[in-house]
Image: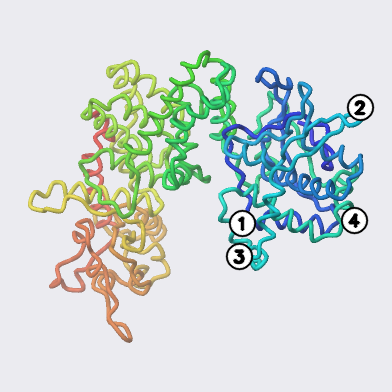
Amino acid sequence: MNAEAKSLRFLINETKLEIPFFQRPYVWKYENARNLLEDLLRCDGKHFIGSILIKRTQNKVEGETPYKGVIVDGQQRLTTLSILIKVMLDILSKKGIDAQRKTEGISALFHRENNAYKIHLQNSFLDRANYCEIIGNIEEKQIEGEPVLKITSPLEASIWDEISREHYRSLTGDKIEEAYNNDNNLLKQCYKYYSVRLRKCNIEQIKSLWDKLFDDNNKILVLITIEENEQEQEIFDTINSSGMHLSSTDIIKNHLYDKFRSFNLTEKDIYKKYSETWQETFEADESVNAFWTTEKSVGRIRRDNMELLFQAVGIINKIYYVEEDTLSDLAKKYKEYIDENLKSVCDIENFIREIISYADIYKNEIPTFSNSKFYSFNDPKERLACTMDISENTTFTPYVLYLYKTYKDNPEKLKKRLSLLDGILMHYIITGASNKNFNKYCNVIIENDKKGESELLSYVKEEIDSFTEEEIFKGLKKKKNNKLAKLILFWIELYRKSLNEKSDETSVGLQFTKEMELEHLMPQTWETEPAWSNLPYFDENGNEITDAESGKELRNEMVLSLGNMTILRKKLNSSISNASFFVKINGKQGAKKRIEGIRDCAKFSITTEIVPDENTREEDYVWNEKAICEREKKLGHEVLTIWPVLRNQLL
């Protein structure tokens, strides 16, 4: 990598600069274009405009310059600066431009190739025609035996006809901005705006701006160049961590479809393949775009659906190894796979079809978690989707994708596989065991599943031999975050509902909002609450503990147990939540109105079962270590029934 401070003169020495064929379009709006120009005018061309990242690569297109620069970052700025140069060149040409400035302008926008001038900056297919119309052509003529270069400006006459009309002259700044931003051709709007704005300047001001922009000593940007073997995403993230993330999937897309060029397909044919596959799948409309750009929490970072999909497909196809590769390696590993394994047009098409098939499963078949959705205990697809989302675990996404594709014609086998995986994840959630080996486990379980059911079950049996009931009951005592505790209690509640033949309600909405709150029956702050700190300590058998330190130690452990937790339809008032067990259950009369207790907020059986009968005497409202242990054991046995794998039983 090489980084140098430069002026715009660097463009004079460039040949072909290429914005990847399938890159996103030019998106700069009025405010972006205006701010750039006004800053340059205000500072007499000395305004620093940031960095431009170019990757030097071999040009595989026959008949063109052997090397080219691919714009990795700076597409919007470089395109806008090129339009600015063209506008100034047009204006100065009308005023009798001198030879030096004319040469500089032409050389900044064009390079000579095969005895003709070609535009330096080759835009993506979305912008290419519009950009070429703005930059125009260079015609070579002979006048009195001497070569003369004529700059064509195909848009200039129509632009001036448009802006000279009374309607346009009457537009206010807001209306001009609105018209600019609502136009589908933002490149043309930029050219038009710069044309109008610079013609309001005197000619000397334009010449001064020109000279500053092309002055070698005026370092207004940092030009970063990398070689073909360097990773553009990693470098981009390093220099532009506060800017727009360079998507690894954009890099993969460009490299994948660029591979068609090596087999001499025309751009028209390549675009047709692209529009029928990638565009239709990932970019069809706003709702499709919104789905693939939706982010999920993965530990401490956020990753969008599209990146998760491509990582999963990479793992399934042994392109990407989570244990060895980092996220910044994703595009690199795909590029290596594409170059080494796709040896024909048919190979490329088959690989694209495979990606599309997994994308369709990911988007349309695998359930997504929603806090407004109604879940059924007997639907392992929904159960696993909920478990993975709430636990923020995407490690097994590759295996889930593989299962949906492999067993699409065998729904019963698919359900068994998903139930098994759900149980394995719940083991981690309940016991709090480390998940550091999940990545390796995911890779190996896919490979064993490919070998056949006997090999898969044999491998899984080895893995779960360490699962013991003792481990599960110890896990129920461990502290968990509220979301995971609610998840466990929620599935226990659904399990109970599934057993209740008299009830028509076999599903319930899981909502992680104020509509569904986790409540510790004995408050976590018990030591500061007289109603609880003055209670005697008991062991799990109901025997009183006389040693205060031993009693405190046990109570601090039990207050974190799942046996001490329940879920309510709403959050309790803090004066109730920390009150005595009797008040906490029944609520109390406040200064103006009655404050609700657990009895009023009990929606689920896991809550109503701990609520005493209304006729129970206050002195018989007991909640202590013994009560917590009894409830913990009951919940634990239900957990082992719901997820048999937790007691060493394969489904």
Which residue is pictured at 45% across the width and 25% down the height?
Answer: 352
Dot 2: within a 10 Å radius of its alpha carbon, few (fewer than 14), some, or many (20 or more) residues?
few
Residue 247: name its quadrant. top right
Nearer the observer, disc 2 or disc 1? 2
Helix, strand or loop for disc 2: loop
Residue 145's disc is 2
Q: Which mark is residue 180?
A: 1
Say which residue appears at 65% left-offset and 48% top-offset: 188
Label 3 to label 1: alpha-carbon separation: 8 Å
How packed is label 4: few (under 14 Cα within 10 Å), some, or many (20 or more)?
A: few
Q: Pointer 3: what residue?
A: 175
* Quarter occupied by the C terminus: top left
Q: Can residue 324 be seen at all in this image of the molecule?
A: no
Q: Position of residue 264 (x, y in %)?
A: 58, 17
Horizontal and vertical percent position of residue 523: 36, 64
- 165 relative to 564 in the view: left or right: right
Estimate the spatial distance between the alpha carbons at disc 2 and disc 1, rounded to whole Å.
Answer: 45 Å
| Dot in front, 4 or 2 | 2
| Image coords of residue 57 (percent x, y) | 70, 24
Q: Are circles 1 and 4 on residues that touch, CB within 8 Å?
A: no
SS class, disc 1:
helix
Task: Name the disc covering residue 204, or none.
Answer: 4
Which sits earlier in the primary sequence, circle 3 or circle 2? 2
- Image: 229 above or below 26: above
Q: Is residue 650 visible?
A: yes
Query: If you read the primary sequence from the N terminus, does the residue marked by circle 3 or circle 4 appear first?
Result: 3
